[in-house]
Image (tube, helix red, strand yellow):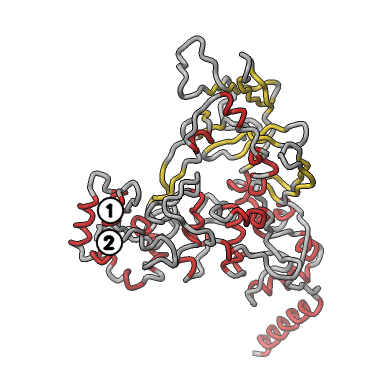
Amino acid sequence: MKILAYIIAFILLAVGTIYLFREPAPKVFHADFVGSEVCGDCHWINYDAWKISPHHNIARLPAEDSVVGDFVGGKYYFPQQNIESESAKPAAKMYQRDGNFYMALHDLAADSYSEFKIDKVIGYQYRQTYLTQEADGVLRRLPIQWSVPRQAFFAYWNEQEQSPQSVHDLWEQMKPLNSAWNLYCARCHTTNLQELSKDPAHTVADVKWTEIGVGCEVCHGPGSKHVEYMNGHPINRMASWLDQNLLQKTAPFIINAANQEQGFALSVCARCHGADIFRKRQPLYRNYQPGFDANGKLNDLSPYFAEAPLVPGRQYPTIEVWPDGRPKGLGTLFRSFADSSHYQDTDMRCYTCHDPHNNKQAAANGMLRPSVQSNAFCLGCHAPIAENLSAHTNHRAGTAGAYCYDCHMPRNLLNQVAGVPHFVRSHNMGSIPNPLLSEKLGLENSPNACLECHQDQSNQWAIQKLIDWGMDKHLIDTDLHLQRNANSDTVH
């Protein structure tokens, strides 16, 4: 017993000494960016996961291991061209020379080509965009991109907007403000982008960044003070460890989203993935950094997550809305979650399901697909359903339709980023199929999860199934989907 008392006394004395000699760490702070490599010196497990993630590799220098397009005699012809004809000239040619990559565009008024050296490549999973460095500093987006699933070059913006393709149009695509990549898109593909100077037409750009790609500090905020506090200060390190593991506090001088309020924590995701916002909010989103403003208040974008109205039938590319009022475009994916009861009434976050350091992976096994594991997660809250799951799903266990995601996260968000239009899962999570609305508006205007699987059946078939199952309370005659957002008529 005496030995135990000595041990306890020693531990208390050690802890007291640590807290006595630690340096103060105020909650409100401002710091500078240091780069992810510095983070990796200590946080090597998370750093290694991040190194292979899409976030890290989204923007790179051109090289054999980063260029996924065909730059060994690659060509692009317009869809209206007869490529069998000997007179057919490609709209663009792609090739390598002396270790560099090039795209040559057909000239407007001559049977010749203008060559552009590839200086940066963006993306690699679904499509790849190519940038060329102009004399006045602009990284200009070239109009032909590579579709990974098609394994071919394509005119992304023409296909996105369903516009006619021509040599003139390809050259015109290099004039808009948003074609100046380092003045527009780079905000979400670099860490700590700083625009030092530019002209109104986006033909001149002097910019710099801490690192290319989405680095640690994009989500955790600038880390210089965190590094200074920890490096060479073992007492500070031990105090920080005690704070986090015994007192559930966050590490000093760094932002840890898991220890912050939900809205602020998801602001780091919304900044790039929450495209459905008013135009007047764009500067706020583009300049967002996790951390504190000049008044010591946390930078929080959550008031704007669902501010812009979901106008039924909206047709703007990537932020389309179904005529029944539900989000449709891929740019509304984050909106479909932030404007749901599962966001507003719970503490769910993006990284509840997605690994925050390797964003292509699941936070836990099975969480990104219909599975026993994802069902268990849902049923952790919806416990009464778990008591008789088959009575709720009316589908045999282990088959499509028996998983929560099948009916409540239907594939109704249009993804066209790779030139192969397809639908991915809504993140509303509370959507309930209403084939009666599909029958009224047409399946092309109001899809339902039943016919997503049973594509050989009709709306009337699905209506009858719900009646047979005693679920006809969901067959409501309305003009808008009742779970289109968190504040619509009914929620799950």
At horizontal 30% and vertical 49% (from top left) the residue drawn is: 442
Q: Is residue 373 left or right of residue 189?
A: left
At horizontal 34% and vertical 52% (from top left) the residue drawn is: 446
Q: Quadrant of the N terminus?
A: bottom right
Of residue 414 and residue 389, the one placed in the foreground of this image is 414
Tell me the element at label 2: loop
First in sequence: mark 2 vs mark 1: 1
Tell me the element at label 1: helix
CA–CA distance in space, label 2 to label 1: 8 Å
Mark 2 sits on what residue? 477
Examine the image and state in which quarter residue 41 appears.
bottom right
Q: Looking at this rendering, what residue extends furthest in the bottom direction?
A: 2
Q: Are marks 2 and 1 in contact (CB under 8 Å)?
A: yes
Q: Quadrant of the C terminus?
A: bottom left
Count of numbered tags: 2
Q: Looking at this rendering, what residue extends furthest in the top direction?
A: 86
Q: Residues within 10 Å of mark 2 (few under 14, many from 20)?
A: few
Q: Position of residue 110 (x, y in %)?
A: 63, 15
Q: Position of residue 326 (x, y in %)?
A: 41, 56
Examine the image and state in which quarter residue 23 appears.
bottom right
* Residue 484, label in figure: none
Mark 1 sits on what residue? 440
The amino acid type of the residue labelled 1 equals Lys
When the figure is inspected, residue 292 is found, relative to residue 354, above or below; the finding is below
Examine the image and state in which quarter residue 406 appears.
bottom left
